[in-house]
Amino acid sequence: MENINWKDLSFGYIKADYNVRCYYKNGEWGKIEVSSSEYIPVHIAATALHYGQEAFEGLKAFKGKDGKVRLFRWEDNAKRLQDSAKGILMAAPPVELFKKMIKKVIRKNQRFIPPYGTGASLYIRPVLFGTGAQVGVKPADEYVFIIFVTPVGPYFKEGFKPVSMLVTREYDRAAPLGTGKYKVGGNYAASLTSMEKAHNEGYASVLYLDAKEKKYIDECGPANFFGIKNNTYITPKSDSILPSITNKSLIALAEHMGMKTEIRKVELDELETFEEAGACGTAAVISPIGKIVDDVTGKTYEFKNAPGKISTELYKKLQAIQTGDEDDIFGWIEILE
């Protein structure tokens, strides 16, 4: 194993020792297989390649000060994968299968779990896709479910520091009544052009507006958006937003801290009234937003105190629960024996 500089890890791929796989054929899931190969043979007419039958998840395992490995809200990921699978007519892996495969892949790759205090974690990527051959537009009759892991650092290279974002009116991530609420690859493919444009212009990410009216805030590229004002945590309500497990956790933490919480439509112009703003998700946890620029009007919304006091407290509390430094009063953590 190469010497890994745990404290300087980016959010990228490092080969671990093993991945785990399970195949769906003849109407049932088979046995869990362990593989050291990073590749899988796929039929040239597989529905994943032609019709986008693919969904994935992202979750993390953390090593605590006590040396124990903690898994954060894995059951929520299992259920969200089931929702995604049903949304595009794939065979949905049972929660118990998801659990067994997660635990097996972590145990097989324990030496890749970053040490406590490095700010890094073991990122776990379950992916499900159609392998059955179809030429007509229809769901496959065969699927493969794979889980691999890789040690990662922060998603945004800035870490927990203010990032800038570009409002895009030129592109949509997902349409109303489409697949926006599912974690499927097509949503991310649809974001690549606008994300590349934002990166080339010096922004960390894109802030999407609703596809119908171009009036309400949707998502921040690969993350959910939240704003804070008047001791209230506010996050957009939309049928085309992925239901973020991190966002759900931050809402619970905010309420525990005595804050009000609101899930509602958020107009772009309301940005002027927020004291703090941020992007949240499994990969980023929280990325405080320092500036948002409208790509059409050029109007700039600045949050001069970023990272704000409340965003910082939420970030620290969530990380403390994940690493075991703070009591898990919510029942989010499972310690791997």
Image (spheres, rainbow, N blue to C red):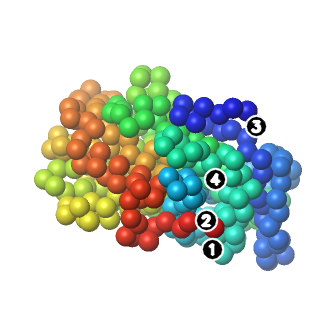
Asked if residue 137 shows in the view, the reply is no
Asked if residue 25 shows in the view, the reply is yes
Disc 3 marks a residue whose amino acid type is Met
**Marks 1/2: CA distance?**
17 Å
* 257 in relation to 79, above or below: above
Say whether disc 1 or disc 4 marks the residue closer to the N-terminus.
1
261 in relation to 27, above or below: above
Front residue of 60/301: it is: 60
Q: Amino acid at mark 4?
A: Arg
Q: Residues at badges 1 and 4 in contact (C-beta under 8 Å)?
A: no
> Badge 3: few (under 14), some or many (20 or more) residues near its Cα, within 10 Å?
few
Residue picked out by circle 1 = 95
Q: Residue at x 25, y 52 (%)?
A: 266
Q: CA distance from mark 3 to mark 1?
A: 32 Å
- Mark 3 falls on what kind of element? loop
Please name which of the two marks, 2 or 4, marks the residue nearer to the observer. Answer: 2
Query: What residue is disc 2 on?
Result: 336
Residue 215: x %, y % from top left = 28, 47
Q: CA distance from mark 1 to mark 4?
A: 15 Å
Residue found at x 41% / y 23% = 202
Asked which quadrant contains residue 189, the reply is top right
148 left or right of 156 in image: right
Residue ranking furthest to the left: 230
- Which residue position is annotated with label 4? 125
Tag 1: amino acid: Val
Q: Quadrant of the N terminus?
A: top right
**Residues at discs 2 and 3 in contact (Cβ within 8 Å):** no
Q: Earlier in the sequence, mark 1 or mark 2?
A: 1
Element at badge 1?
helix
Mark 1 nearby-residue class (10 Å; few <14, some 14–19, many ≥20): some
Pick the residue in front: 152 or 337: 337
Assign a secondary structure to mark 4: strand
